[in-house]
Image (cartoon, coloured by chain):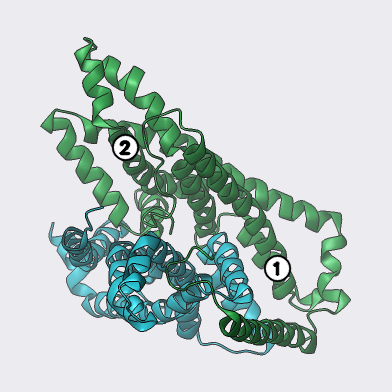
Chain colours: A cyan, B green
Amino acid sequence: MTEFLHVLTDHWDLFLKGFGNTVKLFLVAAVGSLLLGTLLGAFRVSPIPALRWFGGAYVNIVRNTPLTLVFAFLVFAVPKLDVNLEYQTAAFTALTVYTAAFICEVVRSGVNTVAPGQAEAARALGLTFDQVLLQVVLPQAFRSMVPPLMSVLIAMLKNTTVAAGFSVLEAGAIPSYMSEFGEPQFYVLIWIVVGFLILITPLVLLQRFLERKLTVAR
Amino acid sequence: MSSSVLYDLPGPRGRRRNQIIGVLATLAIIGLLAWVIYRFYKTGQFEPRRWDQFKFKAVQLEIVHGLVATLKAAGLATLLAVPFGAIFAAGRLSDHRILRVPSSWVVELFRAIPLLILIFFGYYVPLQYGWSISNLWALVIGLTLYNGSVLAEIFRAGVNAVPRGQSEAAYAIGMRKNQVLRLILLPQAVRSMLPAIVSQLVVLLKDTALGFIITYPELLTVGKTIGGRLAFGFPYVPAYLVIGTIYISICGMLSFFAWWLQRRMTRVRTTAAKPLPLTDVNRQV
């Protein structure tokens, strides 16, 4: 048991730095993918065929590509195109590009859950386009989007570990550093699991709370 | 789609405006593609020597071996994850607290741990105790635990999607719990959850690429080897384009199959259960 505790207390900085970077990766990629994903989602529900096509192609290509391949492409192939990304920038980019495809799907299906009758009724009442959009359609679409968006973000938090394979010191990279110190990996991994549970539990609880609060009776 | 709630059918002015935006968007997309192709051209990605390797039989065989290794890991993990999911779903659906609570814990725990960390458990821990375990099995164990737990949730949702009246009616005609599950609920649930299962298998197949990190010689690892050859001018870009195309075509076909199944399910109703939504991203990332 003391050995188990020592694994953490002896390498406090490594754990702190690793999980600190995980949180940083998560926050930056969350903002990036929400912006990109919403834009692509807007493309997919827009009246312009070219934009719809572009959004659809993006989603279908990225969703069927492993995240690890996106990482590998950015880290190994992109420098060959004379674009030099730092490892951390590559990690932000890979997570953003990958997660945006899933956020795009959430946005698209969220907008489509609103029954057309709602907008028709709003127009029948004489509301203008802005009023229909801002007061009737978007509030309802938003409610149905929040829980799945949380799922995507939770999945992305776990996906940050993939950066471990590409020279970024985050939580997933701790084992390979620890193997240099010859620490028992079993204990190291248990501590990493504890760390992730601490990060994920509030997100899951928030998700459940929002799900209960935002459920629309249909 | 014209059925979108966001806008009306445009009138003449709106149509003209949309056409103009459409043309501009098309130009922007073409410009983006042209820029990428120019970038490729300028850095010599189209030089024949970077593509020469793919003509050699040995290299083609390398790719085939990588693909086989990927499919092997995915196949083994599927074979193990499905029973794992079935057992824990049954546990979570059980009337007995003693089965339900531990099953819930197992499923929730393995869903919360990042897959790579689960794979590391299979990879580093046996090493520490001096057992030898191949990186294939490290990968398969991780994939099984994670995807098995997700499948357990799909199975559970599938059984819950069968309307309650179905089992009430079955109990009313005197069936036992076991018979209700076996004869009434499962046959309907399996149909409703099939699309979701297939799309989870796409996720599993994609996740075998994590084997790259523990140096399992799967497709992505082969891509790195092929791309890293100096004699061909480090053809990383061509290598990953080829590997990417393989992944996208296999996973794309499976995704399409899932989508087709779901569409068929909503059209041909032979079960009272509603199909599980494919867009439930909980399972898709």
Specify the amino acid type for callout 1: Leu
Q: Position of residue B158 (x, y in %)?
A: 35, 37
Near-viewer residue (B154 or B138): B154
List the residue tagged with mark 2.
B161
Near-viewer residue (A136 or B154): A136
Q: Which mark is residue A193?
A: none
- Identify the residue at horizontal 43%, vertical 72% (top origin): B6
B66 relative to B106 in the view: left or right: right
**Mark whose residue sits in front, 1 or 2:** 2
Picture mark count: 2
List the residue tagged with mark 1.
B241
Residue B148 drawn above or below residue B49: above
Q: Do residues under tags 1 and 2 come within 8 Å of each other at their CB atoms? A: no
The quarter of the rendered structure image containing the N terminus of chain A is bottom left
Q: Position of residue A177 (x, y in %)?
A: 37, 72
- Residue A138 falls in image quadrant: bottom left
Q: Chain of mark 1?
A: B
Sequence order check, earlier mark of 1 and 2? 2
Task: Name the element at disc 2.
Answer: loop
Near-viewer residue (A85 or B18): B18
* Other residues around mark 2 within 10 Å, as few (<14) / some (14–19) / many (≥20): some
- Identify the residue at horizontal 62%, vertical 61% (top origin): B221
Specify the amino acid type for callout 2: Ala
Whether labels 1 and 2 belong to a single chain: the reply is yes
Near-viewer residue (A50 or A77): A50
Residue A28 visible within the image = no
- Identify the residue at horizontal 31%, vertical 65% (top origin): A154
